[in-house]
Image: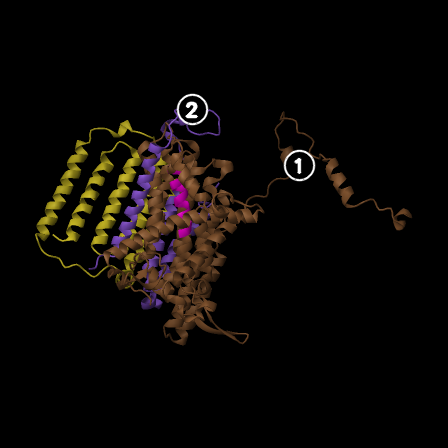
Chain colours: A brown, B purple, C yellow
C-alpha cells in the first residue's frame, strides 16, 4: 500500500521515535559498511586484498578505526578560533543526519500492530528539505577551513565551498524535470508516481519497462549523477582534499573524533545523494521487472531490500569512479559545471516543458506548429549566439619566442637535444626481438 | 493523536546534534594529552609555518563572483520548482512565461560568459 | 496559548536575540553565524504559520546562499580570528535609531491589529504558490528577471572592473 502524506500525520509518537532511532542507527551502520565496502572494492580493482585482518574477512575494520579515534590525542592549533573550530564538525554531521528524515524506505507496514510507512516523515516539500540540509552542510566546511587559522585548510575550505555551491545549482536544476513529471515535491509521491511501468513487448518477450525517471528523463539523471559526485566532493571531483596540493583540505588541522565526524558526514552525504538518486530517478523502493513477476514483491518489508540494493549500486558507482578516474583540474571542473551542466539543464527543461504542453493540452494545429517552430527557433538562436568568447591568439612558435628575447638574456641550452636511448630499453627491445639468424636474413 | 510531520525531522536533527556534540566533547576527556609546543603550530608540510598576513590574508575575487552567480541561479531554480509542480495546470501560458524569464537571465549569463566571468584562471 | 503560539514566541525571541548579537559581537565571522541563526528562526516562524515552501526557500536562499556570499565577502577583505577592535566603538546613535524604529513598528502593528483574530490562510504549498505567482503576479515575476540580470551584470562589472 502506498503511503500518502496523511499517513505520516497519523503516526503514534513512539512509532515515530522508533523510526527516528532506526534511521539513525541504520545511517551509522551504513557508514561503517560503506567505508569497508569502498576499501574492499578499490582494493579489488587495484588487485590487492584490501582490509582482511579485523573481524570476519576484515568487515570490522572501520568500526575499530572509529572506536580508536576518540582515544587519540586531540590537537587544537594555537591560532584557531576555538568555538567555531569546535562547532564546525557538529554542523557537518548534524546536517548530514537530518537530510535522511524524508527518504522513503518502503510502503506501509505494520510495526507492533501499528500501520506506518517505512519513512521517518514526509512533507509536501520534502525534496527541498534534503537540498536545504546539503546547503547548510557548506557551513561546516567553510567554517572548519577558516577557524583552523592555517593556510591549507583555509584554501581547501574555500575551494570546497565554491565547488559545492556551483554543483548545487546543477543538482537543483536537474530535479526540476522530476517535479514536472510527478507534479509533486514530496518524496513518497514521487516514488508512487514511478510505480506503474508500461507494458513493453520486445522480441516476443512481454515485460514491464520500469516507470523510472532515469529512463524517461535520462538527461536529468545524467546531470544529477555528475553533480552529486561534485556536491559530495568525491573523486574525480575531490579537489578540496587534493593531497598533492592541499594536504588534507579543510580538515587538515582536525584530529581525534572531530576528524571522524567530518569523515562520517562525508560518507552520510554520499549515502544521502545515493538514496535521493534512488528515490527521484530509480523508482525508490519499487522492485523492477523480473522481481515484479512475484506478486508480493512490493509489499511488506521486502521493498526495503530493493531500496538498499539500489543505494548500494549507486555507492558502487561512486567507488568505481574513484578507482578509475584521475582527479580533474579546478578550472576544468568549474568550467564544466557553469558552462556545460547549467545551460544544458535549462535548455532541456524548456524542451521537456514544450513537449509536455504539446502532449497534454488540446491545441489547434496552427498553435501547435507555431510552438514547434518557436522551439526550433530558440534552439537555433541559442546555438548561433552561443557565447564562445574571443579566440586566443595562437601561441608564438619557439623560434619567435627566442627571437623576442631582450639583449643580454640568459643563454639558452641547446633545444635540439637528442636523448640517447637508455641501455635498459635497448636491452629490452633486443630481448623481445631475438636476433634473427634464420637463413633468409643471413642472405641479405 | 496527530502532530506536525516536521516533529520527526526536528527529532532526527536533535538526535544528530546530540550525538555530534557528545562525541566531540568526550574525545578530549578520554584521549591522552602530551603537550608539545610544535604540535600546536599550524601544519605546513614540516616547514616553519609562515605567519598569517595581517587581516588573515585575502582571497581572490573569483570566489565572490562564484557566490554571486550562485545566488542568481539559486533564485532562478527556486522559481522553477513551483512552476514545475503546477506546470500541468498552467499549460502554454506557463511555458511562455518561463521562456521569457529564463531568456532574460540567459542574456546576463551570456554577458558573464563573454566577459570571462566563468573562466577560472 | 496553544503550542503554536509558544513556538512563535520562542522563535521570535531567538530571532530578535541573535539579531541583536549580530550587531553587538566584535567577531566578524561570528556575526555572520548569528545572522544564520536569526534567518533560520525566521524560517521557523514561516513554518509555524504553515508557509512551508517559503520557509524552505528562506533556508535555501538566505541561509544557504546569501550568508555564504557575506562570509565570502568578509573573507575577501579581512577575516581576522579573534576580536576586531575597530568594531567596538560607541554605538548609541545606532542603538537609538534601531531601538526606536523597532519599538515604533511594534506599537504601530499592535495598535493596528489590537487583539483581532486573523484566520490562518491555507497552507502555502507549491501548487498554491505556483498558481499565485504564475497566474496572478506574472508581471512582478518577469520584472524579477530584470533584477537578476542587473545583479549578474553588476557582479561582473564590480569584480572584473571596466575593460
Residue B48: in sight, yes or no? yes
Disc 1 chain ID: A
Q: Main secondary structure of the magenta part?
A: helix
Residue that lies at the very extreme toward the front in this rendered image: A56
The residue tagged 1 is A399
The residue tagged 2 is B38
Q: Is residue A396 above or below residue A270?
A: above
Residue A266 highlighted magenta (yes or no): yes
Q: Quadrant of residue B67?
A: top left
Disc 1 to disc 2, how far (Cα)? 52 Å
B116 and A282: which is toward the camera: A282
Spot occupied by residue A237 in the image (x, y as percentages of width and height): 48, 46
Spot occupied by residue A407 in the image (x, y as percentages of width and height): 63, 26
Disc 2 chain ID: B
Disc 1 on helix, strand or loop? helix
B102 and A313: which is toward the camera: A313
Residue B62: in sight, yes or no? no
Spot occupied by residue A279 in the image (x, y as percentages of width and height): 39, 59
**Front position among marks 1 and 2:** 2
Magenta residue span:
A258-271
Q: Residue at x 29, y 36 (%)?
A: C30
Q: Is residue A68 above or below residue C7?
A: above
Amino acid at each position: 500500500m502506498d503511503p500518502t502524506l496523511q499517513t505520516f500525520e497519523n503516526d503514534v509518537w513512539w512509532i515515530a521515535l522508533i523510526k527516528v532511532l532506526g534511521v539513525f542507527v541504520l545511517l551509522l551502520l551504513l557508514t561503517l559498511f560503506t567505508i569497508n565496502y569502498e576499501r574492499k572494492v578499490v582494493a579489488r580493482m587495484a588487485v590487492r586484498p584490501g582490509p582482511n585482518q579485523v573481524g570476519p574477512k576484515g568487515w570490522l575494520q572501520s568500526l575499530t578505526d572509529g572506536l580508536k579515534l576518540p582515544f587519540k590525542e586531540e590537537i587544537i592549533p594555537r591560532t584557531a578560533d576555538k568555538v567555531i573550530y569546535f562547532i564546525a564538525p557538529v554542523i557537518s554531521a548534524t546536517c548530514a543526519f537530518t537530510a535522511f528524515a524524508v527518504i522513503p524506505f518502503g510502503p506501509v507496514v505494520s510495526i507492533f500492530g501499528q500501520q506506518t510507512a517505512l519513512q521517518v516523515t514526509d512533507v509536501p516539500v520534502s525534496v527541498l528539505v534534503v537540498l536545504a540540509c546539503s546547503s547548510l552542510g557548506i557551513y561546516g566546511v567553510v567554517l572548519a577551513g577558516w577557524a583552523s587559522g592555517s593556510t591549507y585548510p583555509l584554501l581547501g575550505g574555500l575551494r570546497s565551498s565554491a565547488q559545492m555551491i556551483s554543483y548545487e545549482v546543477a543538482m537543483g536544476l536537474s530535479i526540476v524535470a522530476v517535479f514536472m513529471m510527478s507534479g509533486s515535491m514530496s518524496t513518497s509521491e514521487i516514488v508512487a508516481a514511478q510505480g506503474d511501468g508500461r507494458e513493453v513487448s520486445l522480441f516476443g518477450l512481454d515485460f514491464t519497462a520500469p516507470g523510472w525517471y532515469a529512463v524517461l528523463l535520462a538527461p536529468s539523471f545524467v546531470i544529477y549523477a555528475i553533480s552529486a559526485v561534485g556536491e559530495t566532493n568525491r573523486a574525480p571531483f575531490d579537489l578540496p582534499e587534493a593531497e598533492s596540493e592541499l594536504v588534507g583540505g579543510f580538515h587538515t588541522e582536525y584530529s581525534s573524533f572531530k576528524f571522524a565526524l567530518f569523515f562520517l558526514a562525508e560518507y552520510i552525504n554520499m549515502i544521502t545523494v545515493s538514496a535521493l538518486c534512488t528515490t527521484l530517478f530509480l523508482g525508490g523502493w519499487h522492485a523492477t521487472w523480473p522481481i515484479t513477476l512475484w506478486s508480493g514483491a512490493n509489499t511488506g518489508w521486502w521493498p526495503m531490500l530493493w531500496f538498499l540494493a539500489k543505494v548500494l549500486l549507486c555507492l558502487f558507482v561512486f567507488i568505481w569512479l574513484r578507482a578509475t578516474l584521475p582527479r580533474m583540474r579546478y578550472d576544468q571542473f568549474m568550467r564544466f559545471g557553469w558552462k556545460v551542466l547549467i545551460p544544458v539543464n535549462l535548455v532541456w527543461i524548456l524542451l521537456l516543458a514544450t513537449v509536455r504542453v504539446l502532449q497534454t493540452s488540446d491545441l489547434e494545429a496552427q498553435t501547435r506548429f507555431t510552438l514547434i517552430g518557436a522551439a526550433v527557433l530558440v534552439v537555433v538562436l541559442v546555438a548561433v549566439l552561443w557565447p564562445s568568447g574571443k579566440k586566443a591568439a595562437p601561441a608564438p612558435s619557439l623560434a619567435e619566442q627566442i627571437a623576442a628575447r631582450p639583449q643580454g638574456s640568459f643563454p639558452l641550452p641547446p633545444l635540439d637535444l637528442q636523448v640517447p636511448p637508455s641501455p635498459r630499453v635497448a636491452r629490452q627491445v633486443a630481448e623481445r626481438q631475438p636476433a634473427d639468424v634464420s637463413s633468409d636474413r643471413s642472405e641479405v | 493523536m496527530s502532530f506536525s510531520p516536521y516533529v520527526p525531522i526536528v527529532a532526527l536533527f536533535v538526535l544528530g546534534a546530540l550525538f555530534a556534540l557528545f562525541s566531540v566533547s568526550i574525545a578530549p576527556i578520554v584521549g591522552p594529552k602530551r603537550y608539545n609546543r610544535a604540535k600546536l603550530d599550524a601544519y605546513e608540510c614540516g616547514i616553519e609555518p609562515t605567519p598569517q598576513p595581517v587581516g588573515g590574508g585575502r582571497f581572490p575575487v573569483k570566489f565572490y563572483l562564484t557566490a554571486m552567480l550562485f545566488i542568481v541561479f539559486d533564485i532562478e531554480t527556486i522559481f522553477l520548482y513551483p512552476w514545475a509542480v503546477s506546470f500541468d495546470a498552467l499549460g502554454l501560458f506557463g511555458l511562455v512565461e518561463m521562456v521569457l524569464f529564463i531568456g532574460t537571465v540567459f542574456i546576463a549569463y551570456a554577458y558573464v560568459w563573454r566577459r570571462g566571468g566563468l573562466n577560472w584562471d | 496559548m496553544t503550542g503554536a503560539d509558544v513556538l512563535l514566541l520562542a522563535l521570535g525571541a531567538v530571532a530578535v536575540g541573535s539579531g541583536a548579537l549580530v550587531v553587538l559581537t566584535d567577531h566578524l565571522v561570528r556575526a555572520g553565524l548569528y545572522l544564520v541563526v536569526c534567518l533560520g528562526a525566521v524560517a521557523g516562524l514561516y513554518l509555524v504559520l504553515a508557509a512551508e515552501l517559503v520557509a524552505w526557500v528562506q533556508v535555501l536562499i538566505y541561509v544557504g546562499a546569501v550568508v555564504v556570499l557575506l562570509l565570502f565577502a568578509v573573507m575577501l577583505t579581512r577575516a581576522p580570528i579573534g576580536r576586531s577592535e575597530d568594531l567596538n566603538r560607541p554605538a548609541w546613535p545606532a542603538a537609538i535609531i534601531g531601538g526606536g524604529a523597532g519599538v515604533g513598528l511594534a506599537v504601530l502593528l499592535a495598535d493596528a491589529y489590537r487583539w483581532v483574530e486573523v484566520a490562518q490562510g491555507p497552507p502555502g504549498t507549491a501548487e498554491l504558490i505556483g498558481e499565485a505567482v504564475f497566474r496572478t503576479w506574472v508581471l512582478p515575476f518577469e520584472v524579477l528577471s530584470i533584477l537578476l540580470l542587473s545583479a549578474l551584470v553588476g557582479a561582473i562589472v564590480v569584480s572584473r572592473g571596466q575593460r
